[in-house]
Image (cartoon, rainbow, N blue to C red):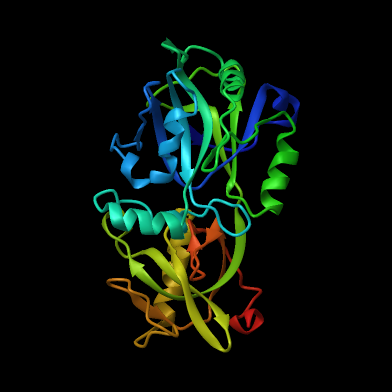
Amino acid sequence: MLATPGPLPPTGVADRWAFEVKQDGQRAMVYLPGDGTILMRARSGTDITAAYPELLPLADALGSRSAVLDGEVVALDGHGRSDFERLQQRMGLAGSPAKVARMAARVPAHLMLFDVVHLDGRLLTGLPYAERRKLLTGLGLAGPAWSTPAAITGHGAEAWEMARDAGLEGLIAKRLTSRYEPGTRSKTWVKIKVHRIADVVIGGWVPGRGRLAGLPGAVLVGERRDGLLHYAGSVGSGWSEAERTRLAGLLHVATIDACPFAQAPPVAGARWALPRLVGEVRYTSRTRAGRLRHPSWHRLRPDLTPDDLA
């Protein structure tokens, strides 16, 4: 079951929802037959069990009881936050046990459990979320590499502020009465991202294709540090048609031959622009190299010059 992107539920109905921290990792269905074995599958159905050997002891956590659990495999940073960039070092290594073992020691994985869909031979998908959550909590699944993070009922605005202040990616709001709908992106689960804002300088663009022919398909943006423009990412969403058309005119006037970035970004078909246009973008987090993750265009900042950002 997948969540639909959306806003926080209104304060007046917040007590009808539970709020969980949105984890940034690899979704996993965990099959525990109760015979001392474990099977983990990614959203695609791929068997990822061998990729995470530190999770194998979970096979014995329920004894002879059988269960199918839903959760997210994450790699935590130094502040206890899920970090997808760290987890990527672990993904896709199942074919090399020696390398998997080495990477498990360097970048340990942790399984965050948030739902139970089958327990002791009984299918639970028809039960309300509140009942499933109570059953999950009652399993007491807390171990060296797995846990059952708390869910907060009501107080959505406070939970969102906590997530924002802690530098988390966002929240998942789940209606207390919601059934589990396999394979569905349901509006009874809402994904609320915490967006951050950055002022950036446009240093180039990639021409659009198809209906965007003649317009920028994406702009290449950077941030000023030590007198240089450092590439921060490619922004290809968030514009209205009018904004994209206006930006096309501004970029046409600003076209130059030389790359203005301290290091040319590895972007095929890039065209360069005089780095004088400042824009504001929303993003969710940054990579270790400082690149913006999931950036989207917010607005031009004609009130700012690149020198204002130095």
Could you tell me which residue is drawn at 65 percent across and 26 percent down?
Answer: 17
Against 38, is 166 above or below?
A: below
Could you tell me which residue is drawn at 72 percent across and 24 percent down?
Answer: 15
What count of labels does the image hold?
A: 0
Note whether residue 1 is visible.
no
Along the line of sight, the residue nearer the viewer: 135 or 103? 103
Answer with the quarter of the image where residue 129 lies. top right
Could you tell me which residue is drawn at 60 percent across and 66 percent down?
Answer: 198
Against 225, is 34 above or below?
A: above
Could you tell me which residue is drawn at 29 percent across and 34 percent down?
Answer: 45
Along the line of sight, the residue nearer the viewer: 60 or 213? 60
Q: Position of residue 52 (x, y in %)?
A: 38, 45
Against 93, is 125 above or below?
A: above
Q: Position of residue 217 (x, y in %)?
A: 36, 62
Against 287, is 278 above or below?
A: below
Q: Which residue ends up furthest to the left in the rendered image?
A: 95
Left or right of 262, for residue 271: left
Q: Position of residue 10 (x, y in %)?
A: 70, 31
- Quadrant assignment for the C terminus: bottom right
Q: Position of residue 4 (x, y in %)?
A: 49, 34
Note whether residue 92 is visible.
yes
- Quadrant assignment for the N terminus: top left
Left or right of 125, for residue 91: left
Answer with the quarter of the image where residue 33 lies. top left
